[in-house]
Amino acid sequence: MQWADAIGGVLAMLVFALAPFANNTLTGLLLAACGAYWILLTLSDERQPASESLQLEANTTVSPLATPIHLLVGLYWSIAVIATALSPVKREALVGLQKLTLYLLFFLLLARVLRSPRIRSWVITIFLLAALAVSVYGIQQWFMGTDALATWVDPESPLSKTTRVYSYLGNPNLLAGYLVPAVVFSIVAFFSWQRWMCKALAVVMTAVNGTCLMLTFSRGGWIGLVFGLLTLVLLLAHWWSIYLPRFWRTWALPLVLGTAIAVVLLAILVLEPLRDRVTSIFAGRGDSSNNFRINVWMAVLDMIRDRPLLGIGPGNNAFNKIYPLYQRPRFSALSAYSIILEVAVETGFIGLAAFLWLIFVTLAQGWRSLNRWRETSNPAGFWLLGAIAALVGMFGHGMVDTVLYRPEVNTLWWLTFAIIASYYHSTKPQPKSQLE
């Protein structure tokens, strides 16, 4: 058992190392292995009193196996089970429930093994190295040129001839969803990693990942990036506020935010492709992509209206079975193109309430843990800060797109929850000076 969490960490690293390059079947097998391993650990682990919580290292976060986040994850899964049992397409909903169960078991394993700061750092590092490889290939596509695998841009748009990179993921919107947390964690890595060579690598990762994300020309990805970076700036300002003089404590945040907004506005004014893409967000039905999403949302609202309490059951198979009965002519879709509508149509307003409650409790728990770690100046707390910002950024992207349910992104979604849950503890973290 002394190697139990290390083995779990290796399994998690395999998922993040292979997810962007492997097919979904292999990713599913790895998730099944992670779930089976967590069940094995849970059944074989010896119960210990709360005062004797397992510590893998001297600086391991003391964390019980059940947190408020775990309880709400269990509640959401239970609602999905009931929605499956009452679904009009039970067979398809059962497939979706199996996929959801795999992701939630993966969360449970991560929340356990990431209590070790060393394993936590390695898991995030492996993800960042995989993201770097993905971004390098995406930037190569920009310079070498590549054919679109689908109609991603309105043919009548000024950007119809613009290359939208998609790297190994096959879709620019999916690539953007994958890179939003990569950019956030790359920035956080600069503060968390202590060696200068590692900090230099973090700077390179931030530049490459950020550039590749912009070259996807994914408006949803850009929205997610803005959400994530603004949250990150706010949290960093809060982290350092207790060490700043009174003047900077008051004006640091407005100055940083003002500078960031000025840079973004200047880029929009100077770069014509960026300006065209941003203005299309506000074009309403005048943009074909906007018009498509609006028509899908209208059909999904009709689906929710007919089954408001528990929905049609989880998963895209159930959605694809029911949606054609409601779709507008010529507007077929594989999902609701919004995480809020997707959860509501799958598990009804009951499931949506549990889902939003889960997000709220997770962010609240992350905020409380962040305040405890801020007092110690321990750089391990920066990963918590990054997880909160990444969660907000991915949620912002998911509000207007469907990429959150793809394995490459969904595994990262539950990684953010698991990181925040891994910091849940009843004892105060040790200062950095006591851990060296």
Image (tube, rainbow, N blue to C red):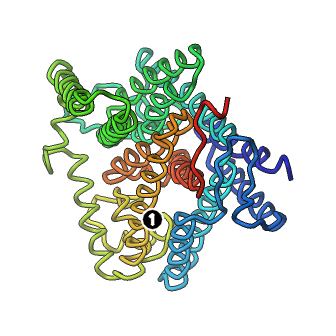
Q: Nearer the viewer, residue 190 or 427?
A: 427
Query: Is residue 114 shown above or below 305?
Result: above
Residue 403, percent across and down? Answer: 43, 49
Q: Residues within 10 Å of mark 1 (few under 14, many from 20)?
A: many
Depth order, front residue of 247/192:
247
Residue 178 versus residue 345 in the image, above or below: above
Amino acid on which the number 1 mark rests in the picture: Leu
Report the residue that reaches farthest toward the bottom: 86
The structure residue drawn at horizontal position 44% and vertical position 47%, both measured from the top left corner, is 371
- Left or right relative to 82: residue 357: left
Badge 1 element: helix
Q: Position of residue 398 (x, y in %)?
A: 37, 52
Whether residue 225 sits left or right of residue 25 in the image: it is left
Residue 22: image quadrant is top right
Foreground pick, 97 / 24: 97
Which residue corresponds to the image point at 49% horizontal and 18% vertical from the top-left?
Answer: 204
Q: How many marks?
A: 1
Q: Which residue is mark 1?
A: 358
From the top left corner, tell me how far across and down residue 376 is, in percent.
52, 38
Q: Could you say which quadrant of the image residue 299 lies in? A: bottom left
Residue at figure coordinates x 50%, y 43% from the top left: 373
Residue drawn at x 34%, y 65% is 341
Q: Is residue 194 above or below residue 60?
A: above
